[in-house]
Amino acid sequence: MYHSIIEEARSRRLNPIVLTPSQPIPANVGVIITTEGESESIDFSRDRMVIADKPQATLDKAVSLLFGEDFEQVIIGIDPGKYPGMAVLGNNKTISVHHVSVGEVCPLIKRIMREHKDKKLMVRIGHGARLIRSQLINRILDLGLAVEMVDETGTTPHLGKGVHGQVISDIIAAINIARIPGKKVGKQFIEPSQGEVRVIQEHSREYSNGRSTIPRMLARAVAKGELTLDEAVEMHKSD
């Protein structure tokens, strides 16, 4: 467990220090990550301890404690797509980054809202991937958060030698989107094109490993955000 947390911390450039419970704690340490059992024997403020859990959640809590006093607003940047990149920023500092499916975006935002319940939260989302972007905007507005749409032109970097992967590009784009003021938006009216409906039908075929393709009516409902792809595939199976 600790190894995974240390790797996650290093990926966020947090420079963790590994200590045993009996070792003295350096003066520049702001937060301790430990187990419930070990916490009783560590001479450190309980308010500045995080009990180790899943790596991302643990680091999110630790970073919130480290930087929580320094900012009042949390900005969530989203690079929309089939698997959106997400970044959480406070005072222009990157607190956490994520790469999730479209269906996982709002549950993750709910978790971020719980972890930063004393902060003002807002979302900035790129203007690309029209259908997914519109669906996400509507769902995020239902959570009670303000949403700004950002011109994402130029936010996706060129990956140089030795740096590979769509995940990295999406996450960096999300960080850049979070830093760009956008235009506040309200509920989106979604009327999918024939091509967009066809793409969703193709996704449904991929989703079912080539066994079936959902009809246009269900694909259109998915495109409009009325159904998830999972729900549409299940409905088609039961027909």
Image (spheres, rainbow, N blue to C red):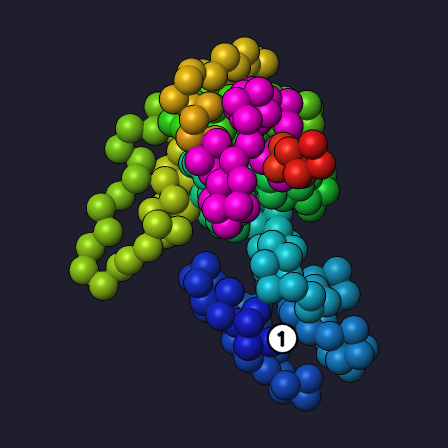
Lateral position of residue 216 relative to residue 45, left or right: left
Q: Position of residue 163 (x, y in %)?
A: 26, 59
Q: Which residues are magenta?
A: 201-230
Q: For the residue labelled by badge 1, is the local secondary structure a helix, a strand or a loop?
A: loop
Point 23% across, 63% down: residue? 162
Q: Position of residue 78 (x, y in %)?
A: 47, 36
Lateral position of residue 98 relative to residue 238, left or right: left
Q: Which residue is mark 1?
A: 1
Point 60% across, 64% down: residue? 55
How crowded pointer 1 is (Cα within 10 Å; few <14, some 14-19, many 20+) is rated as few
Q: Position of residue 80 (x, y in %)?
A: 45, 34
Extreme residue toward the left, this view? 161
Instruction: State whether residue 127 appears in this view.
Output: no
Assign the C terminus to one quadrant of the image.
top right
- Which amino acid type corresponds to the residue marked 1 in the rendered image? Met
Point 75% across, 80% down: residue? 38
Q: Is residue 213 magenta?
A: yes
Q: Is residue 51 magenta?
A: no
The correct choice, above or below, for 119 with respect to 10 in the image is: above
The correct choice, above or below, for 16 with respect to 97 in the image is: below
The correct choice, above or below, for 203 with respect to 43 in the image is: above
Lateral position of residue 102 relative to residue 54, left or right: left
In this orientation, which residue lies closer to the viewer: 203 or 168? 203
In this orientation, which residue lies closer to the viewer: 185 or 203? 203
Assign the N terminus to one quadrant of the image.
bottom right
Q: Position of residue 23 (x, y in %)?
A: 63, 86
In this orientation, which residue lies closer to the viewer: 173 or 189? 189
